Image (cartoon, coloured by chain):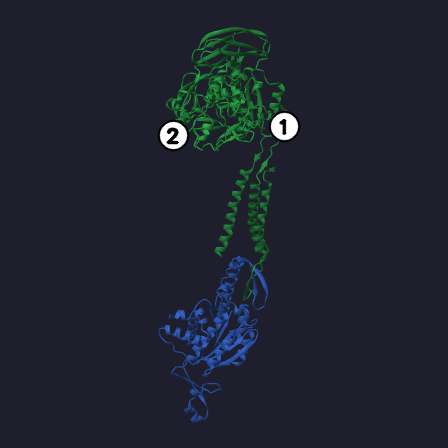
Chain colours: A green, B blue
Amino acid sequence: MSLLAPWFLLGGLAVGLPLWLHLLERENPTRLPFSSLMFFERRRQSSLNEKRFRYRVLMALRIAFFLLLALLFAKPVWELAAGAGVGDAPGLHILVLDTSLSMNYGDRWDRAVAEAEDVIDALEPADRAQILAVGPGVRVITQPVGSREELRVALGTLEPTASRNSYGDLAEAVRTLAPDADVPVTVHVFSDFQQSAMPGRFSDVALPTMAMLEVHDMAEPESPNWTVESVRGTTRVFGGRETHLEAIVAGFGTPKTRKTVTLMLNGKQVARQSVDVPAIGRASVVFEGFDAPIGNNKAEVVIEPADDLPLDDRRLVAVSNAEPSTILFVHSDPRRRDLTFFSAALDASSQAMFRVEGATVTQAEQSRLDQHALVILSDVPRLSQAAADRFESYMREGGAVLVVVGSRATLAARSTLLEDGIEESSYTGREQQRFQFAGPMDESHPVLNQVKSFQGVKFYRYAKLPVGEYDDVLARLSDGSPLLVERRVGDGRMLILASSLGNIWNDLPVNPVFVPFVLETARYLSGLDRGMQQKSIDSILELGGRGGSGVQVFGPSGERALSLADSVAGEDLRLTESGFYELRRAGATELVAVNPDPRESNLRPMEADMVSMWEATGRNQDTTPTEGEESLIAPPPLKLWKLLLLLLVLIALVESVFGNYHLKVQREA
Amino acid sequence: MAVQTLLDPKILARLSNIELVARTVVDGFLTGLHRSPVFGFSLEFAEYRPYTPGDDPRFIDWNVFSRTDRTYLKRYLGETNTHLMMLLDASASMGFASNSVTKMQYARFLAASLSYLSIRQHDAAGLIVFDEKVRDYRPPSTRSGNLLSLLHMIQRAEPATGTNLDLPFDHFRQYTTMRSLVAVISDFYMDPAAVVKAVRPLAYQGQNIVFFHVLDPVELKPDFDRSILLEDMETGDQMEVSPDFARREYRRRMDSHIEQLRNETQGIGADYVLLDTSKPLDLSLREYLLFRQRRR
């Protein structure tokens, strides 16, 4: 027997109380002068012993009470001998069915179900079993039950999916379920034991010590599989520019073979090629120049002939063909060259995503801002309050503005859209070759990611930008002054450049970095900085950010994937099906292609050593008691607190009866 | 104030003057009676007897003296037994009390009351205070100052040492030849046979003896809730006794002792009165009066 909280035994010192009371009681009788002892006798031994015996019994009961109470708090447990009560004890069997994509290979799933049924039939009458499914996540199909029929029915409801599984999730589920069981637990895993399903840390698959792993391997000795591993390319085209898609065909455990790769667009074949895929290798197929209708297009790359796992023989990708987006370039002086430089930089991009539309302040105030992907205010002096409100409203509803500060902007007491105003501009002077360079910058930002550095750009003059509490300073000058600041305004955003674009305050427009800077700024602010989204099954689609409010999501089957309330709230969505999800926002519709996780296509199984190591984390299979052998399995320790509590109650009752008897005798006298 | 209340020993104990106690008890007791008993002198002539020193000279028949030159007292009916002799036990055990009244106090009240009643009815009253020896003695007398002297003697009696009943009885026999009413007031912690043996000569003399057995209620029925160490007030011996014994065996023995004492004393023609110090004194007085009536 061992004690979980041995320090509580110190409470046993409380037995001193009954000892003290009883001893004091016995040794110090009351003295009383009496007229005569003529009719008295000294206490006889027999009556004394009788009374002492009765008091001793009472004292013993009280001592026993305190000792048991201390022992109860010390939490004693009885360590059962290895093998004690295991052989014949009812067990709990957890049947885990792998429902990931790889289980669709050949007849793996049918064999898994058949073996699971065999296990159910082999259960002892007192055994209970529970069914779990892993992939996606871990799903509890049944609670521990003893009914075989119930288990078979539950088993019949399962089907393999296109999801990925993780043995780390499985082990965590077993660790959660098994500690509640006070009987031996056997975990039957019916899976192909893919290497790709193992987590990064081996300790994540450790099983609890009372659980034993039973491996039911459904993998074949040879399981060659080809898949369209990825499709990359230009998924956004503008104005009919050339399309370009590159598909990678991979083979896992495969011999060299020839595959036919077909490009389908909106359900129609648009291109077809043959490619030699090396043994256990990859091959690339390029599709370009195909016509993509204006709008969102559903493209699909399919390899043929199909193999034993057809679900990964195709890959979906969305291709968008749209007219170039317009940028409203608002400037104060048409003679200035800022518009020229900006337009030239955009034209230098091969993508032709944008079309720049110049406008004066007056024209901009009358223009419909929501028709533009981006508004640039280049050195614009003070706007009217109405115009400022329009621009601010445009931003709050998801619009984007680039504010470039120049001489006119700094002259105004209150600059355009900058409530705090421009304090002053700093003039370093070019005559004496005095200028600022760009200092630290946030290269992780999408705008600066391609720019890398403003090295070589000279800044002769710049404005002292007001930086709010929630503003992000993306770049600084060498003296620490902010050069580029980003500010969130409602659902939209604003970038503020502290130096003009007219090659007067600086020589940025004539620097090679100007083109990528302008292009990335335009792409970032317009939201066109990324291609059409491609996601894997069970991944999360983030719906917040620019235009996140009011987005409606429709699944591959055309049904609404988000409730109206969630649509308004812009809640993120877990993608559970393979196919195209349609996102409808105000003024724009976007397609998201969802494909199975490519890791599921690699059917390479775990090494045998790794499986053995996994088994060893739980109750060792080799120590299962066999006939005639001494078992080494240690069952869970037996908790004694219930028995002790019962004894304690019994002693308290007996002590009460004894004590009341003594008191009653005294009252009657 | 009710008679019973007056005779409550606890109330009497608050009275500092024993004469007052005696008057309170006797007058209160007599007031409660429907008729006043007549004791002592009656008007019916019985006989002449020679005058002896100490007799009340008021009763000398002067006619007889003038004719015979001898002094004779006229004796009337009811005058035959006019001497009351009280033997008051003042041993240490008489000092026991479980409430506010000790046995000694109770005995004093009784002796004082008997003295007052006797003198009031023209009986001569005397007193012997004893413990291991005779501590004080006053022969019976009807003189006017006798009552006060008796009361003072009674007041002075304090519990002292052990008990020896032989000595006072010897003393009484030695100094008294007349037939008397002998009231023995004690707790009688002695062998009843020894008591009777000491008293028997007096009984043979024709003395009328009444035993007033004074006991505390705890002595009659001790009730201890735990083992207790008792200390003998006369010998100093100590003994640990169990409450169980006190409740059962002791009571049986005490009852047996009382019964034996009653039987033994009544066997020699004496009277026995058991007095509980928690009870009012009228009981003892009533017994005395009944005894007097029977004797007539």
Q: Which is more N-terminal, label 1 or label 2?
A: 2
Against A258, residue A611 (above or below) is below
Location of the N terminus of chain A (image quadrant): top right
Residue B164 is situated, as x and y percent measured from the top left of the image, at: 56, 72
Residue extending furthest toward the left: B34
Nearer to me, A282 or A164: A282
> In the figure, is residue A156 to the left or right of A18?
left
Nearer to me, B111 or B208: B111
Residue at the disc numbered 1: A632
Chain letter for mark 1, please: A
Q: Say which quarter of the image contains residue A166.
A: top right
What's under tag 1, amino acid-wise?
Leu
What's under tag 2, amino acid-wise?
Gln
Cα separation between marks 2 and 1:
85 Å
The label on residue A385 is 2
The label on residue A39 is none
Q: Is residue A106 visible?
A: no
